[in-house]
Amino acid sequence: MKDLLHRLFTKYGFNDEKAKVLADTHTENTLAGVNSHGINRVASFLHLVSEGIVKTDQEAIKLNAFGSIEQWDGQFGPGVINARKCTNRAIELAKSDGMGLVALKNTNHWMRGGAYGWQAAEAGCIAIMFTNTKPNMPPWGGKESRIGNNPFIIAIPRNKGHVVLDMAISQYSFGKINEYRLRGEKLPYPGGWDVNNELSNDPEKILQKERGLPIGYWKGSALSMILDMLATLLSAGKSTSKIGEQEHETGLSQVFLCIYPALFQDPNISEKLINEIIDYSRTSSPTNLGSQILYPGERTLRAIKSNREKGMKVNKEVWNEILSLLQY
């Protein structure tokens, strides 16, 4: 997959280095079981490249610095490249000053936000990251979409397996909803509203108007608003409101915050405390739903192990579309 995607991204105008980062990231997202933000997103991403929405020759540059806080401009380059670069910079600042924050404006979809949480954790950093999006959820009490499902990531490094929370502020990301659609399956729980303003678990009906259901109802609605405010204020970029005025979802605002605990805390104590919380959570009696008690990121580690052993499952329609793009 990496080899094929590298050739494909090169064909669409990316230099060898950027094509490799894009190919690696999309493949690793798929390996982690997140096809919705890996292989399934390649064709739509390349459509935006062809339309000139994603600039192949641009990437994030630093605009301002205030101590360990920096503002960057993504210059409408590929979201994955910009996110990798800004995460690396936040890690550098954290290892120098204990904490580093990079706020990015004018970027594109970063695909799987958790990838950058894992990147930070591998470098020994705690991370808090989030992005705004186009409006794709109604605020609680409203019918029309006015807030974004603004993905939110928290990562904590751990020897036995990093703890990484990666979640949209909607019950399901729209990439995940589309993944269920491709499989011809219903969502396990309601994920949004249909055209009749009824909550639905039918992907086709939800995707007609893209009105997702906020997690925790009114609480998710409030969390979406506050993340949009923070991303917009810190980056001096576009809000969900302004992004929604455009034909395409572009010019997003993102925040990458890293903390380097090794500078101020004994790593052995840190490991002990994290394991204590995980172990205690698992003492809860199981329900009849049959689900296991997992810490954030554990499912990802299991998916990677399984996919390495058995191979990655890819939708034939998606794979054939990518092959056709390579041959076109």
Image: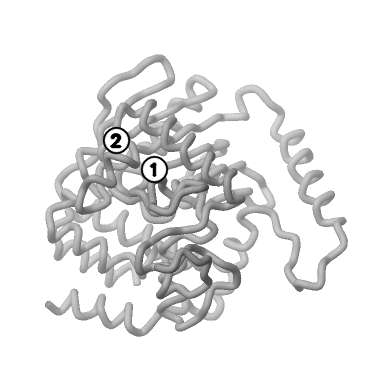
The amino acid sitting under disc 2 is Lys
Question: In the picture, which quadrant includes the C terminus?
Answer: bottom left
Comes first in the chain, label 2 or label 1:
1
Q: Which x, y percent locates residue 23?
A: 31, 62
Graded by Cα atoms within 10 Å as few (under 14), some (14 to 19) or many (20 or more), the crowding at tag 2 reads many
Query: In the image, which disc is placed on residue 175?
Result: none
In the structure shown, which secondary structural element does the residue marked by tag 1 occupy?
A: loop
Front one among 173 and 196: 196
- For the question of whether residue 308 can be seen, the reply is no
Question: In this figure, which residue is indicated by the disc labeled 2?
Answer: 238
- Measured Cα–Cα span from mark 2 to mark 1: 9 Å
**Residue name at image x 20 percent, y 38 percent:** 75
**Residue name at image x 48 percent, y 75 percent:** 202
Question: In this figure, which residue is indicated by the disc labeled 1?
Answer: 132
Front one among 15 and 112: 112
The amino acid sitting under disc 1 is Asn
Graded by Cα atoms within 10 Å as few (under 14), some (14 to 19) or many (20 or more), the crowding at tag 1 reads many
210 above or below 264? below
- Position of 87 with respect to 158 (left or right) is left
Q: Which x, y percent locates residue 155?
A: 57, 43
**Residue name at image x 54 percent, y 80 percent:** 310
- Position of 37 with respect to 141 (left or right) is left
Disc 2 + disc 1, Cβ < 8 Å: yes
**Residue name at image x 27 percent, y 51 percent:** 249
Asked where in the image residue 58 lies, by quadrant, the reply is top left
